[in-house]
Amino acid sequence: MKRYISIFLTGLFLATTACDGDFEEINTDPNRADGDVFDPNLILPTVSYDYGNMITGYTGAILFQSMWVQVMSSTSTGGANYYSNADKYVPSGSTNSYIQNVWSNGYSAASRVNQMQKLSMEKGFTNLNAVGGIMKVLILSFVTDIYGDAPYSQALKAEEGITQPVYDSQDVMYMSMLADLETALTTLSTSGDQIKNDVLYSGDVAKWKKFGYSLMLKMAMRLVEVDPSTAQSYVQKAIAGGVFASPADEAVLVSDQANGYSNSSANALNVVDDIYEVRWSNILIDYMKASNDPRLAVIAEVPPAGLAANRNGNVVGNNDPAVQIGMPNGFDIKGGATDISNEPNFPGPTGTGDDATPIGAYSRPTAIYRDRDAPVFILTYAEVQLLLADAAVRGYTTPMTAAEHYEAGVLGAMTTVGKFGGGTVSSAAAQAYAEANPLDMSTTDAALEMINMQIWATTGIQVNFVESWNNWKRSGYPELTPINYTGNFSGGQIPRRQPYPASESTTNSTNLQNAISRMGGDTWVNTVWWDAQ
């Protein structure tokens, strides 16, 4: 991937929220190629990797959302005390830094997209410009879903003199993003310019269109509680345009450790303290065991007894589904009332003497999650089919029935887990599971719960923790019990957004304050516009 992702681009672009009046002159390097000779296709892989890096690892997803939405769990009182941010909503020394990562990385990536689009239009690269439009919506929708109101209409216009952009209210922002996405998709043409250096789809315009319409579907489904008519309208547009038709269409970013582009979630899970302290939650493991989910043997293992084995990611654990035990959220190993040993189903410490570990024989992620060459799942066929199942239950017109979409989503999830490069689920096992667990259509609530529980589990297994959290906010499933741990920053509630970066109070104070006033505050538990649960 190194020949695609040109690291010399790093200094070319600045995010929208800070700029000098002489922006263009100061940020033009006379020793680099200008727009006349520079190929903007070279920017695309950088943007793709930036987005993949933004949704994974210590940028926030593992440290916050993985455990907010109780896919994972941690005692988080050893060396990896930064997981206190997630499992117990308790601040650590770097919490303020973690808060701003998605914001700063998102606008930096969007700025690169903006430059790519500008150069594309100068050269008549209409397809690349359209792909840029898709990527910009992908990136900034991710940002707004985490923070709420954000710059959009005036964002990325520092060269035009707008260095303090207004924050669009999220309802307005969503309408603009959906419209911009639709415009980009109608512009894409198989007869247009060739998209080069494309690490997602190798220049396949048809697949880019499917990805764009699948993104439109996901965004539309965010709105089902707050604007059902717009939601239905854009769901129908997405279906008509053509969403993912199989797992072969899904947006999966290949990692490349050898050339410096490793999977950042794997980077995190290879840290010794993370190997030891990060476990699958009891909610996820119990959910999978209850239905004999064949993915369980692929994703979970109980490490051998003892501290050394628990801290060594190269030691292979026991992946027998029968022995898997998920760790409850909200416990520690401090010896007090919240010590994990006091949990009623505590499986007991392991090892003896100097090799003893108090953490217990809980299930940890298998080696596929520590593989730095593991792919990053941006949007999958399984998620698309499950969203279509949700839409069908709500009475929207979809290609198949809700039950058929649900089965397709389940089968797709079984296929996609094999893309990690570790264990796989056989087609026979996948089909048997789907047949044994059909969609419960006895009531609308029962169907929606089953669909969205599957979205939660599937996106969590795929390490797309922010999506698990966003869909929980949208649907209310699973029904989670908040952790009210001493010293938490959210009043004992599961966080529903991240506060704005502190830097915004100095670089864009007036517009920030207008947004905070409009949203009713800047706390961890304010809701974004579409979060009506």
Image (spheres, grey):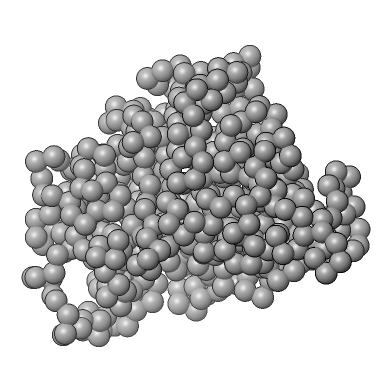
Say left or right for 449 vs 51: right
Would residue 132 be found to the left or right of residue 34 on screen? right
Identify the residue shown where x is 13% and y is 75%. 34
Q: Can residue 173 be seen in this view?
A: no
Residue at x 45%, y 53% (from the top left corner): 374
Residue situated in front as seen by the camera: 347 or 288: 347
Task: Answer with left or right where residue 212 lies relative to residue 119.
Answer: right
Which of the image's four quarters has the C terminus?
Answer: top right
Q: How many labels does the image show?
A: 0
Asked whether residue 197 appears in the rendered view, the answer is yes
- Tell me residue 358's x, y (percent): 83, 60
**In the image, residue 50 lies at what x, y percent?**
38, 62
What x and y, as percent, mark residue 214? Answer: 36, 37
Q: Quadrant of residue 159 in the image?
A: bottom left
Coordinates of residue 327 in the picture (x, y in percent): 75, 48
Residue at the spot x=30%, y=61% of the render?
1
